[in-house]
Image: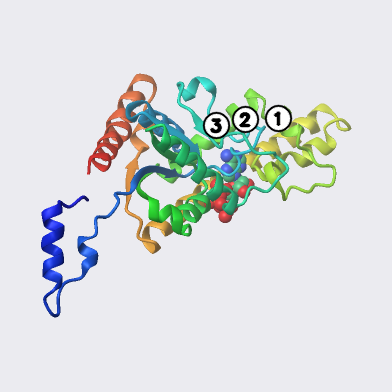
């Protein structure tokens, strides 16, 4: 907030009085730049919402999903396609060497650079992704980020039972789209799935299948594949629950003011009705929230 020159002079003269005033309240403070952050469990629609908002607010998106930062496994990690991006530039999406461990510190460094470059273009940065440890490291633990930016948090939430059935179907669609061949590229003969992109759900679960697929009969092969796919579904559901719990922790313990958007209704509808519900319960209200945040 800027204060006028006469107001500054008046403040200085008041300071001459004994027991005077705290000068801090008269020092003009630089207004912080604004950043929107979209959180939510896997499968809830964070990408769709962030792209919707980006088209309405001249924004660019910084990915905060710790597996989508890597090059490769586009289907397995469920990266947005070029068509889904609708021309919106994405940062930190498929740019990191799949063998390295991209730490919270790395994320803070690269995401801060991306946010600054988006700001320089006069655009709004939207950080979106499921990795809450990345968001916490950036927003809560990085003093520099805190001092520069004011954040608006949007939390995309879906009833867990509905989300579980949705992510299970999504895994079947991934399998049809080529999950198995993608994951095969990262099969590790030593079964070491502790670094980089190999930690992605969809890779370790396929290990047993890849180890045996060429030496077993068709029936056993189909059974092993089903076991692997079921395990991927189970682990994705567990991930969604963990992410949901982590968001509640950020809200309750760190007192982040999250705007929760319940997407369940849109998940229960189909086709045009689903799109209409999405606009009514998610995209429309989020647009209002971000509009108020930016003009505050
Ligand atoms: P944690 O501290 O448990 O790593 P986090 O908030 O840092 O939590 P999450 O996004 O919850 O990160 O990811 C946890 C794990 O879930 C990853 O290490 C990876 O195994 C898996 N995972 C996350 N995102 C994806 C994805 N897009 N595709 C496949 N697996 C993923």
Which of 206 and 96 lies nearest the eye of the viewer?
96
Q: Mark 1 to mark 2: distance in Å?
A: 8 Å
| Kind of element beneath mark 2 | loop
Q: Quadrant of residue 169?
A: top right
**Residue at point 63%, 24% (across, down):** 176
- Count the numbered circles shown: 3
Question: Which residue is denoted by mark 2 in the rendering?
Answer: 74
Crowding at mark 3 (Cα within 10 Å: few <14, some 14-19, many 20+): some
Q: Would you say the residues marked 1 and 2 are in contact, meaning their CB atoms lie under 8 Å apart?
A: yes
Viewer-nearest of labels 1 and 3? Answer: 1
Q: Residue at x 71, y 43 (%)?
A: 198
Evaluate whether residue 245 shows in this view: no
Give the left or right position of residue 134, taking residue 71 as reference. Answer: left
Q: Position of residue 225 (x, y in %)?
A: 73, 34
Whichever of labels 1 and 2 marks the residue nearer the N terminus, that label is 2
Considering every residue shown, the one lying at the far right of the view is: 215
Q: Is residue 273 above or below residue 63?
A: above
- Residue with the mark numbered 1: 182
The answer to whether the residues at label 3 and label 2 have Cβ atoms under 8 Å apart is: no
- Please tell me whether residue 87 is drawn above or below residue 171 in the rendered image: above
Mark 2 CB lies closer than 8 A to ligand 1: no
Is tag 1's residue or tag 3's residue first in the polypeptide sequence?
3
Point out residue 30 in the picture as x, y percentages from the top left corner: 30, 51
Element marked by disc 1 = helix
Q: Residue at x 60, y 36 (%)?
A: 77
Query: Which one is in front, 48 or 265?
Result: 48
Check mark 3 vs ligand 1: CB closer than 8 Å? yes or no. no
Q: Quadrant of the C terminus?
A: top left
269 lies left or right of 22: right
The residue that label 3 is drawn on is: 170
Q: Position of residue 260 (x, y in %)?
A: 33, 46
Looking at the image, tell me whether mark 3 or mark 2 is earlier in sequence order.
2
């Amino acid at each position: 907030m800027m204060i006028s020159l006469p107001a500054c002079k008046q403040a200085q003269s008041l300071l001459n009085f004994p027991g005077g005033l705290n000068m801090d309240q008269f020092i003009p403070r630089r207004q912080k730049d604004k950043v929107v952050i979209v959180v939510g469990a896997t499968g809830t629609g964070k990408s769709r919402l962030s792209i919707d908002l980006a088209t309405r607010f001249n924004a660019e998106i910084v990915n905060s999903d710790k597996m989508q930062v890597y090059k490769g496994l586009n289907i397995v990690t469920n990266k947005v396609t070029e068509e889904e991006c609708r021309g919106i530039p994405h940062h930190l999406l498929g740019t990191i060497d799949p063998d390295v461990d991209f730490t919270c510190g790395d994320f803070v460094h690269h995401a801060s650079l991306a946010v600054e470059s988006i700001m320089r273009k006069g655009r709004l940065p939207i950080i979106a992704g499921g990795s809450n440890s990345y968001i916490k490291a950036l927003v809560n633990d990085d003093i520099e980020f805190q001092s520069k930016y004011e954040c608006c948090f949007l939390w995309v939430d879906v009833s867990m039972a509905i989300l579980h059935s949705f992510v299970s179907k999504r895994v079947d669609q991934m399998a049809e789209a080529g999950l198995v061949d993608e994951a095969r590229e990262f099969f590790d003969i030593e079964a070491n799935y502790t670094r980089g992109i190999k930690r992605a759900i969809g890779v370790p679960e396929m290990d047993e299948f890849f180890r045996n697929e060429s030496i077993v009969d068709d029936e056993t092969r189909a059974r092993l594949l089903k076991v692997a796919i079921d395990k991927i579904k189970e682990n994705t559901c567990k991930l969604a629950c963990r992410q949901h719990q982590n968001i509640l922790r950020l809200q309750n313990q760190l007192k982040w003011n999250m705007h929760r958007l319940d997407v369940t209704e849109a998940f229960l509808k189909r086709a045009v009705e689903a799109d209409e519900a999405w606009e009514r319960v998610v995209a429309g209200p989020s647009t209002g929230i971000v509009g108020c945040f930016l003009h505050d």
